Image (tube, rainbow, N blue to C red):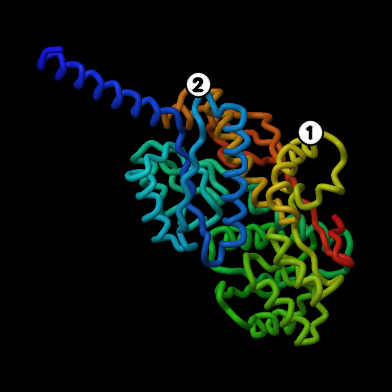
Amino acid sequence: MTFRTFIAAGLLSAVSVLAAGAAAAQETYKVGISAGLTGYAATVDRAWRDGVELAAEALNARGGVMGRKIQVIVEDNRSEPQEAVTVYRKMLSSDGAQVFVSGCVSAGNFAAAGLLVRAKVPMMLCSILPQQPDQLKWAFSTLPPAGFEVEKRLEYLRDKTQIKKVGILHDPTPYANLQKSVAEKVAAKYGIEIVAIEQYKQDDADLSVQISKMRAAGAGAVLKIGLGGTTLTAAKNIKQLGADMLLMTSLEDLAVFGPVAEVLGDKFFFVASPSQVYDALPEGPLKAEITKFLGPWKAKYGDRDPNWASRGWDGLMLTAAALEKGKSFEGSAVRDAYEGITGFQGTTGVYNFSPEVHQGITINPFVLATIVNGKIKVVQ
């Protein structure tokens, strides 16, 4: 072999290695998750992440999507909007994320939405959607409309109690404020008067001042809107005050609700998703879809609450459906394909997206439940 031939062979070999490396890089589809793995959203966002990763495992076990394996990249935004911007930027620039299936920190997703618009990368979220039209165009959500949680509680008060006055106790997050606004608009339709609205911080160790104001105003129930340990704080304060009031909380991890039920007993109610009341569901497409998720979920996580994880599972399965529908991994094509998904049976309900509707759940899937002797019981 001449020196020139040797050099040419070496160059050819190097090019082949680079080409093989490039091909290998193209064999994965990179899904980014900005999640509050620490901070107030940790309980729900850790579950969301686990659900997305479980869906990726299921998809990869059957060969991936259109020949590519799913690679999930996760960054902790610490439940803080500014930190969310940082981690979104990192996943876009350093990790090459091609789509985001991100968690429930609405403010963080809002803060980073402009980055994704400029990068032309769509996102399927656990949270509510940004309101600016250019950002909304690239954002989709598995979250049912905020009004569904509010209305389920008001329906119960109208149909099953004599309570006519309620107080609203909410945290400062965008989703909580949206629920509060809905309650203010629709309460009268259910014959309910809102006599007090009080806000709290996620790290507040005492809510007795706010609850006392509601009690003094004649509230027979507290509609608590927000996540985390403050639900137990509110329950303890109601009991310590000797207040004859129901505590009705929004969607949350069941691990939070067990101790609350021990404090308040039959005066505690919560909004529940279908996966949380699986045993009470009739046979049908919804239960069948939840079964597909619950098998691997229980095998890996046992009796851990499936709710937020099941929606994370939906988020990635919707993304896989969009990839297959659009027959492309390119951001704009995936965005367009999301808008064309209709009649998609998920674990929370049926998703129907369109150019006008980016919040896919359009029929209320929730029930109202309580816990009796450690068992979940559907009441509405």
**Can you tell which quarter of the image residue 270 is in?**
bottom right
Residue position marked by numbered label 1 in the rendering: 285
Q: Secondary structure at mark 2?
A: loop
Where is residue 170 drawn, in percent x and y?
A: 62, 69
Per the rendering, the mark at residue 309 is: none
Q: Quadrant of the C terminus?
A: bottom right
**Can you tell which quarter of the image residue 224 is in?**
bottom right
* Name of the residue lying farthest toward the left: 3
**Spatial separation of the CA atoms under disc 2 and disc 1:** 26 Å
* Name of the residue lying farthest toward the front: 1
**Amino acid type, callout 2:** Lys
Q: Nearer the viewer, residue 291 or 185?
A: 291
Q: Quadrant of the N terminus?
A: top left
Where is residue 236 drawn, in percent x and y?
A: 73, 81
132 relative position to 222: left or right: left
In the displayed structure, 241 sits above or below 228; it is: below
Residue position marked by numbered label 2 in the rendering: 327
Q: Nearer the viewer, residue 365 or 256?
A: 256
Where is residue 362 drawn, in percent x and y?
A: 68, 40
**Amino acid type, callout 1:** Pro
Q: Residue at x 68, y 29 (%)?
A: 343
Q: Residue at x 38, y 25 (%)?
A: 23
* Badge 2 or badge 1: first in the primary sequence: 1
Label 1 crowd bin: few (<14), some (14–19), many (20+), radius 10 Å = some
In the displayed structure, 176 sits above or below 146; it is: below
Where is residue 183 drawn, in percent x and y?
A: 67, 61
